[in-house]
Amino acid sequence: MLGWLISLISLLGIDITQQPWLALGVAVLLRTVLQTGLFIVGHDAMHGVLIPAEPRWNHRLGGLALYLYGALPYEVCRRNHQRHHQVPATADDPDFHDAGGTGAMAWYRTFMARYLTAGQMLRLLTSWGVLAVIARAHSSSGWINVLLFCTLPLLLSSLQLFIVGTYLPHRNQRAPLHRANPDSLDWPTWLSLLACFHFGYHREHHDNPALAWFELPQAQRCRRALANP
């Protein structure tokens, strides 16, 4: 969260016309990673593992992380995510899309439509407008800075979370396969970390939601060892 804030303050005031394209691309990717990290913090808070000994602060920080991520209402997201764990890959799962023959983008549109509300969009647009005014006072490219370092990272992060954390792990639970459990992506630990903070180790998360995100690689190694003694 601190890295997200520092990078935001640092990048909003730069003149992008004076920066090389490679540096801007790296900055966008960095902001995307940090944006995704905010959601992971909020996600762990939903499961009560961010600050287990202090439930009130656990949910407060989780709520702050999700609000900074995309003006998401914490309690609504928490209820939906609990429902996802209770009845995964069913018609009552708010994150699941079982329309036959539809691809990832159709699922993504349905997924986003269930979470995006008029109120959330208003809060986002208002926040970006305020940031654009602040940025414009320090740089001639102010509103473009907001698009590059706020709007674009949020869009990329939503795709990252959906593809790595929802679509790839749960796609084989759709017809005609109807597998009982979500898949875990068979990726090296370093790639899993960069891809989405180990969100792709999804079966381990469903088997034990009380594990923090950084504990999932060890859980996967243990599961593999038991499966291949």
Image (tube, rainbow, N blue to C red):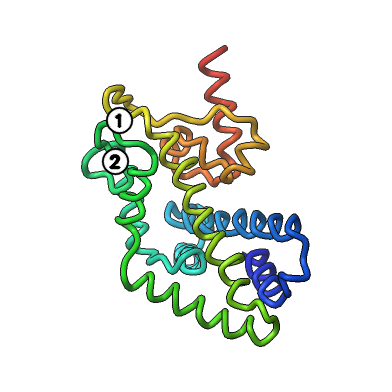
Image point 58% across, 76% down: which residue? 143
Q: What's under tag 2, amino acid-wise?
A: His
- Which residue occupies the foreground of this view, 55 or 193? 193
4 sits to left or right of 18: left
In percent of width and height, residue 83 lies at: 29, 48
| Quadrant the C terminus occupies | top right
| Residue 82 in view (yes/no) | no
Three-letter amino acid code of the residue under disc 1: Arg
Q: Local crowd at mark 1 within 10 Å, few (<14), some, or many (≥20)?
A: some
Q: Is residue 42 above or below residue 86?
A: below
- Work out whether mark 2 precedes mark 1 in sequence or the reverse, and give the earlier one: 2
Disc 2 on helix, strand or loop?
loop
Residue with the mark numbered 1: 174
* Corner quadrant of residue 172: top left
Q: Residue at x 27, y 23 (%)?
A: 176
Please indicate whether residue 29 sits to the left or right of residue 158 in the image: right
Q: Residue at x 60, y 38 (%)?
A: 192
- The answer to whether marks 2 and 1 mark residues whose Cβ atoms lie closer than 8 Å is yes
- Circle 2 is placed at which residue position? 97
**Where is residue 86 shown, x and y percent of the image?**
29, 42
